Structures are given as C-alpha cells and as structure tokens.
Amino acid sequence: MGKRSVRIESITIENFKNVKKGSIDLENKRKDYKASIVGLYGQNGSGKTALIDALALLKLVLCGQQIPVKYADYINIDAESSKLSYQFKIKDEEGSFDIWYQFGIRRGIDDTALNMQEDVSKLESRTEVFDEVLSYAFSSQAEKIRKGPLIDTRTDEVFIPRSKFAELVGVDKSKMTDLLVTKKVVQATSRSFIFSREMINTFRKNCYDKKYMAVIEGLMMFGNRELFVINTENSGLISMNALPLAFKYKENNADTVGNLTLPLNAPAPIPEEALGVVSKVIDNMNIVLEQIVPGLTIGIKDLGPIAFRDAKPGKSIQLMSLKNGKEIPFQYESEGIKKIVSILQLLIVVYNHLSITVAIDEMDGGIFEYLLGEILNIISEKGKGQLIFTSHNLRPLETIDKGFIAFTTTNPENRYIRMTNVKGNNNLRDFYYRDIVLGEQSEQVYNPTNNFEIALAFHEAGESFGA
C-alpha cells in the first residue's frame, strides 16, 4: 500500500455512559498544524472518560477482538443500546479517502455453554456489536467518488449494497449460507463482523478493488498498529508498583508494537527475546527523559537467566534509576516520574509520525503542571501525530493553541463544545473560569455549587458520627 496515513477527524457518541449525545471534531479549525491535539476539560462525571472509552472500544473493534462484557454496562441506563460513529481521513499514494464507520453495542445473553433451558436471569451477559456501516468517499487528481456505503450490515442478508457484496466477496451463491453463519457466530462472540478475521480473509481472497481494500485494511492496520489508548487502569497499575509500557518503534523497515507490564517491587521475569525490545525502548526514552527531568535516566539490571514453565529461556531484570551518578531501584521514584516514563515512548512517536493516534485519560496525573504544559506545547507546535487527552490541570489552556481545547457541558444531549467568542489575546484558562461563573456559552459547562451548603453538609456528616 506504500505510504499511508490515518487520522480520526471526528467522533459522535450516543447513549454511551453519561453521554446521551456528544460530537467532537478532532481537527483544529483555527490554524493549520501538522499535529492534531485535543485536550478535553470539564468537571467530574461530565463525559471526559467516555470519549477515551469510545476510542478503546474502537481499537477492540478494528482489531477484531472480543468486546469485554463491561462495555454492555456502559450503555446509558435510559437506553437499550449505544451508537458510536467515527470519521477518518486516509491518505495514500492513490489519493485521499474520507471514511465513515459506525456501529452499535447492546447487551446480549451468553447461552452458548448451556444444553438445557435455564432461567434467563441467571445467564451471563455479553456485549454484541451490531448495525455496522462502513462508507467512504475518494478524491485524487484523476478521480472523485462521492460518499456511499461500502458495507451495511443492517439487513437480514450478509450485507448490502448487493453490488458491493459481489465485488468484495464474489457472486458464488453457495457462499451466502456460510457467510450468514459467520455473521451470527461473530455476533455471538462479541466481535465486529466487518473486521473479524473471517471476513478480512474473505475480502483478501475475493476482492480485487484496491480502493475497497485500502479502506478496510487501512482501518484494520490503524487499529492494530497505530491507535493506542492509555486509560486510568495504567495509573492503577503504577500505584500497585507495576510499570505499564506501551511502545512502537521501527527497525529494519518493520514496526514493533506492543505492551509490557513490569513489576517494580520484585524482579521482573521476561522472555529472553523481549530483553532486546525493552532495552531499545528504554534507550530511546532516555534521550528525552534526561532533558525533561534533568540528569535522570533509567536502565536495566540483568539479574541472570531463568526458565519459564514451557522451558523457554528468560531473564530476570530490575528497572533502575540513574541520577547524579547514583543508582536506585526505579520503584522508589515518584508516581509522576513513573507516569512520564510509562507514556513517554508513545509521546515520542506522536511527535515524529503522522499516522499515530494516542489517547490518554487523566494525562496530568502526578505530572508537574509546568512540565505538562511545556510538553504539550512542544508536541502541538512541532509534532506530526494525533494526541487526545483528558486532564484536570488547566495549565495547558495557557500554553497550547485554543483550537486544541474542547470542553464538556452539563447537558447530556450535547456533551462536547468548543468555546466561542474567544479572542486572540484572551487567556483561555481565565476565560473558562469566567464562563463557569457567568455562563456565557450556549451550553452550561459547570453545575454550580454552594459553599454554604457544602460546609453545612460537612457539619451534618460529622454530627452523625459524633464528631
């Protein structure tokens, strides 16, 4: 496929967690930047994490992975299903593709392990992916194709339009029954139909249209190798003395992508072949780390060979901090340093590569606010990739372009907005504080609280315990 870049341009969420409806454009409309940065701000419980979860769900779907049952619990309490829609831009040597992909999730009943009728209330739930629709438009110097559906699964058939079906899987009618069975099996196993391994193999075997495959394989490769989602579970692991490391680097024209979680309060057993990967990732990070935390680097102490249960050779290692000529176990560093290290390699990739999307929930957790603002400013001004983050720290509102910032509202029917009437010389942080007090935007961004009532509540709660 040659050189290819993928970027998410917008996301729309419906009936997902506490977001009944929310749309957010991920491109900066104020100025033309190579980087695509979106910092999402708002009060607790207003839909920030829902956006990150929507991206985590997208990654699972594009990778053809089974969707965990927890996502069924994310369906809004007043709805029977959630709908998620994403718009992408793919550019390759052929031209430019605008792509629209949407799907729904709903709660299903997992009765696959039963051979007798049972009380439905006792059966376990599962998350079902349904009503997938993939559409695209294309433009190049020589050709233009208007937006139209490529695969629409909202039918009792395998998918429509029939003309696209014939071009993607052929005209052999004997395949129809097999593909209908595949559609049922995939849904029963909580996976995407379009991006399931079964359908990807079918498309590759039968489809000869390069544009169709550029759309399907472009999104599949993006989900597997270029979309990274760092949620608050990472912070939880750090608190429990483990270091999650997500990484991507290129060596000998091949991408290495993966995730490692290294225990910090005990020697970490890793496969022998993984030691080289960890060493390369850490060496790469150290180039930046000693600049943002002056004098600090991290290293690996080899504690000797081990053997895993399957007799495969491994190594026992421990991460160490090296600062001012002294070596100490990395576990004794602050949580802020651990957080920086856990995401730093991905930030390096965002800075250097156009086709990379990293989403980080609560990016500010434990990181000094001045440093956070400087890192985001550097990436936004000179980076190339796409970074989506949520934060409670308002320092970035003063350091990055106002077009990179979005806010949540108190209205569940319109959760995400950009501030309007912001002048070039306005300090966005002060502007946001003023809107909290005066409510000058079309949507309210903060549910007001009453200090007297809060103090009274503290007093009453104390009295109930005899304080």
Image (tube, rainbow, N blue to C red):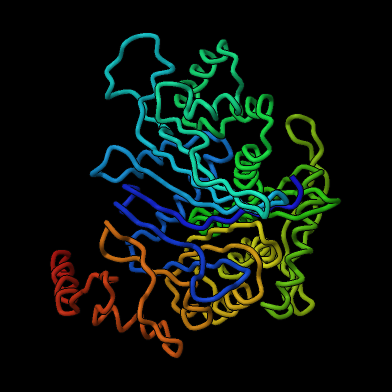
* Residue situated furthest bottom in the rendering: 425
- Residue at (45, 36) in percent of width and height: 132
- Residue at (41, 40) in percent of width and height: 70
Name the quadrant of the C terminus.
Answer: bottom left
How far across and down, in percent of the image, does residue 463 sit? Answer: 13, 69
How far across and down, in percent of the image, does residue 3 sit? Answer: 74, 52
The residue lying toward the viewer, choosing from 311 and 80, is: 80
Quarter of the view holding residue 435 = bottom left
How far across and down, in percent of the image, does residue 216 sit? Answer: 60, 39
- Residue at (59, 57) in percent of width and height: 357
Q: In this view, does 153 lie above or below 260?
A: above
Q: Is residue 353 above or below residue 139?
A: below
The residue lying toward the viewer, choosing from 30 and 403, is: 30
Q: Is residue 454 left or right of residue 394?
A: left
Whether residue 266 can be seen here: no
How far across and down, in percent of the image, does residue 140 sit? Answer: 65, 53
Whether residue 185 can be seen here: yes
Q: In this view, does 59 lie to the left or right of 313?
A: left
Q: How many numbered marks are there?
A: 0
- Residue at (57, 10) in percent of width and height: 174
* Residue situated furthest front in the rendering: 142
Name the quadrant of the N terminus.
Answer: top right
Q: Is residue 280 left or right of residue 444?
A: right
